Image (cartoon, coloured by chain):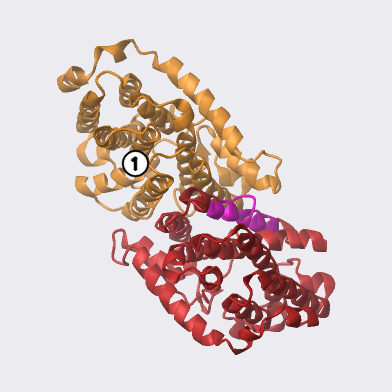
Chain colours: A orange, B red
Amino acid sequence: MSADAKRAKTTSSRHFDLAAYLAAKTDAVNAALDKFLPAEKTKPATIHRAMRYSLFAGGKRMRPALTLAAAAACDGTDAAAMPLACAVECIHTYSLIHDDLPAMDNDDFRRGKPTNHKVFGEGIAVLAGDALLTQAFEIAAQCRGWPRYSHRNIVLEIARASGSLQLIAGQVADVEGEGKKLSVAELRYIHERKTSALLCCAARLGGMSANCTPAQFRALTDFGHHVGLAFQVIDDILDVTQTSEQLGKTAGKDVAAQKATYPAIVGLEKSRRIAEQLTSRAFAALKTFKGKAVALEALAEYLLKRDR
Amino acid sequence: MSADAKRAKTTSSRHFDLAAYLAAKTDAVNAALDKFLPAEKTKPATIHRAMRYSLFAGGKRMRPALTLAAAAACDGTDAAAMPLACAVECIHTYSLIHDDLPAMDNDDFRRGKPTNHKVFGEGIAVLAGDALLTQAFEIAAQCRGWPRYSHRNIVLEIARASGSLQLIAGQVADVEGEGKKLSVAELRYIHERKTSALLCCAARLGGMSANCTPAQFRALTDFGHHVGLAFQVIDDILDVTQTSEQLGKTAGKDVAAQKATYPAIVGLEKSRRIAEQLTSRAFAALKTFKGKAVALEALAEYLLKRDR
């Protein structure tokens, strides 16, 4: 971590037990998702089995954790933030199911398990993704709104972050960039959309659920944007430095698919420095919260130091 | 048309110029969709070209027309109903793009043109469908709400009609029913979800945009449900009685795919009688509107008499 980042960090987060925090939030998110989704036996059972297979495949729940931590930083509650945390996780899971399809990244494993289409076939995998995307909006609509953050604002927030100008734009640019020599600016365009948009949305939704002030909303936007970019740079680094076993998914696939990555364009060392700088920027954004954003700080630190 | 249906019909719709009505509404819907969607050149251009390719492929705009006609029956305006009419058309188009994929119905032609994946490839076709589904919620959020029909209610209405218990359930049951001998009840389960759910949603959204009374909402639900079922029975009939050229899509594909259809289970003549009975039920539901539902009546009559 850079000196800047160290200065920006409050002392409180150094004693924060992130492992216990993540374990508790993961349990709470899993219980909420289980309630929001139709039971596995609900007719037609195939689609609900397929939706739940990927949703409960052991995801790290980083996005819901960001939503809950952002809510807490704004004096909100888990209860108010939970529908939005779950909605974001449904969007994330749908995007993974569709990205893994043979027509896209053609991945056989995800989180150490066969991908959705390997288990249920391509047709059901497409529909399971569609169903999770649709379910996200149904779940999000269960939140309570505020005059400043109405259901209308919340739906727009999710739809824009997930739409053809953000999340889907990132996937399109990623697919189209394969085998091409991209500039750092072009790669950043992909990362901002493919990863940062939804992480940023996750943080902002937490603030919205807590009826945050406009200044807090701006801080969460800045934080989410930079954490998201750092997250993807690190993903690129891990893809070339870790084994498939360590990652729980196919390692080296970016190189195999001739995808542009930070390590490929600027080298490993510079990639690591970029990730650190982005994380410092994220920490700096949290100053607004005057020490109340301990969980967000710990999450950002974890994302920088993670090894899978 | 049965004697019942004739009695239920008001005289006013007999002089209603549906062709002029549909032409005007199609133009208005197309103009609104063009405004709501990112321009074709918006980066990444591929996804916006793909979304627009299917959205402007000459669809009959029956669902948006139902929304606008339902709004009019409740003294609403086209302006208030338009975002919801466009949202429903985006959902319909996304479902066609995904249903046409090789992993599902594997259709090469739709509305006389190559299907989305034949032009843009499977990966982009999946993403174009995803983007239209997401866009539907963004567009729907642009409508004005009412205390009785808030943005929350409207998002729930669309998400539920399109989700894993309705639209997607229908497609799953349809795919799983291929090659199996289904009962009329099982076939009706598929039709209610695959077709009726979204047509019913289209009608209800029109009422919601017009701040309709609970009685009007119930009438639109009843109407949409029965028109939707009639529509799908007629689709089954046309598949066996018309040529591909007449339909603008592959004819006889239900038989080829060993799909259960009304003609296959109960024969052509009984299928025609069922369609007429369903349409009569739809007309009966419109009595509540005391002659103000002329456009809805004309649409229902058109759906029964259509030959493609």
Tell me which residue sits at (74%, 71%) in the image: B281
Q: Is residue A271 left or right of residue A210?
A: left
Q: Which residue is mark 1?
A: A148
Q: Main secondary structure of the magenta part?
A: helix
Tell me which residue sits at (31%, 58%) in the image: B44
Q: Is residue A279 left or right of residue B24?
A: left
Q: Nearest the camera: A72 or A145?
A: A145
Q: Where does the magenta region start and end? A: B157-175
Question: Is A93 above or below relative to B203?
Answer: above
Question: Is A221 above or below relative to B107?
Answer: above
Residue A274 location, quadrant: top left
Residue type of the residue flagged with mark 1: Arg
Residue B237 location, quadrant: bottom right
Residue A236 location, quadrant: top left
Q: Is residue B174 magenta?
A: yes
Quadrant (top left/top right/bottom left/bottom right) for the N terminus of chain A: top left
Measured as percent of width and height from the top left, residue B153 is found at 52, 50
